[in-house]
Image (cartoon, helix red, strand yellow):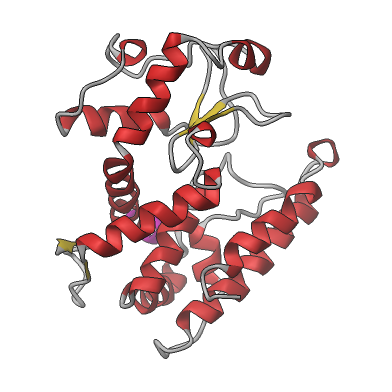
């Protein structure tokens, strides 16, 4: 069993099979479970999206409103003893070597890209552990960011979800999918869309309906994000897929 959130009195744990299941479901969510999907660069975006969680990797000198996570994944995997491909051996949090989507697409069949894909296939379990670790560290940051009067409710809602394997999947996936909600750069018109914002909008008390309430709250939060987004980003094109993903939390 893998202990999570040791500071929480309910002492949540996930079995190895739960961890594997979460990793496979997120791989399916992000990449349709395909090897080619482990290395992508979406049209209209300024960064590569890599691994089962489509971890963001910015080129040199490029930054955006979304948190970069791929260098942290590489560091985590390296510390666990996995062999890194040549592309990632320079050390430190190096930038993405492709400066644009066009460059990235031209490199699809290079040795470096094939080695990168194989590395990502070989480390799926470690990537899942990284995602679980990210969730583990998210709660203190969310509580710190929440208004003092909201903190007890945020903790309660997190605990409701963390008490079941399906609830754990929902919050692990969502925090990877849309972030913790603590970065002020991840706001449109002053409103965020991360896990914190979803938990803040929940007010139930029972465990049985926690995942259903979370899915409803997540759908509303993402719909609000699209409404608030700059017109030029055309985020409405993604909403159907986002809602489909959230529906997987409660089997909808």
For this rendering, which residue is in front, 105 or 178?
105
Whole-percent x and y of residue 128?
Answer: 32, 48
Residue 244 appears in the rendering? yes
At horizontal 31% and vertical 16% (from top left) the residue drawn is 85
Does 126 sit above or below residue 1? above
Q: Where are the magenta residues, as a range?
A: 139-143
Q: Quadrant of the C terminus?
A: bottom right
Whole-percent x and y of residue 34?
Answer: 51, 40
Magenta stretch contains residue 217: no
Does 191 sit above or below residue 83? below
At horizontal 16% and vertical 34% (from top left) the residue drawn is 80
Whole-percent x and y of residue 141?
Answer: 36, 53
Q: Is residue 107 toward the left or the right of residue 146 in the image?
A: right
> Which residue is farthest right?
231
Residue 47 placement: quadrant: top right
Q: Main secondary structure of the magenta part?
A: helix
Whole-percent x and y of residue 237?
Answer: 79, 47
Q: Is residue 85 toward the left or the right of residue 55 in the image?
A: left
Residue 247 placement: quadrant: bottom right
Q: Quadrant of the N terminus?
A: bottom left
């Amino acid at each position: 069993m893998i202990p999570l959130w040791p500071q929480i009195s309910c002492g949540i744990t996930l079995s190895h099979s739960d961890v594997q299941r979460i990793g496979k479901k997120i791989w399916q969510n992000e990449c349709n479970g395909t090897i080619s999907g482990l290395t992508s660069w979406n049209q209209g975006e300024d960064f590569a999206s890599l691994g089962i969680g489509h971890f963001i990797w910015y080129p040199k000198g490029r930054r955006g409103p979304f948190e970069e996570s791929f260098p942290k994944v590489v560091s985590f995997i390296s510390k666990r003893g996995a062999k890194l491909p040549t592309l990632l051996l320079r050390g430190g949090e190096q930038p993405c070597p492709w400066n644009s989507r066009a460059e990235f697409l031209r490199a699809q069949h290079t040795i470096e890209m094939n080695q990168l894909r194989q590395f990502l296939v070989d480390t799926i379990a470690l990537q899942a552990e990284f995602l679980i670790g990210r969730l583990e560290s998210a709660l203190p940051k969310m509580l710190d960011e929440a208004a003092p009067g909201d903190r007890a409710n945020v903790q309660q809602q997190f605990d409701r979800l963390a008490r079941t394997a399906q609830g754990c999947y929902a919050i692990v996936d969502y925090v990877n999918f849309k972030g913790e909600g603590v970065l002020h750069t991840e706001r449109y018109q002053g409103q965020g869309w991360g896990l914190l914002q979803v938990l803040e909008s929940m007010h139930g008390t029972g465990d049985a309906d926690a995942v259903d309430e979370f899915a409803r709250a997540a759908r509303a939060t993402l719909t609000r994000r699209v409404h608030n987004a700059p017109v030029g980003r055309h985020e409405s094109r993604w909403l159907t897929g986002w809602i489909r993903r959230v529906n997987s939390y409660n089997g909808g």
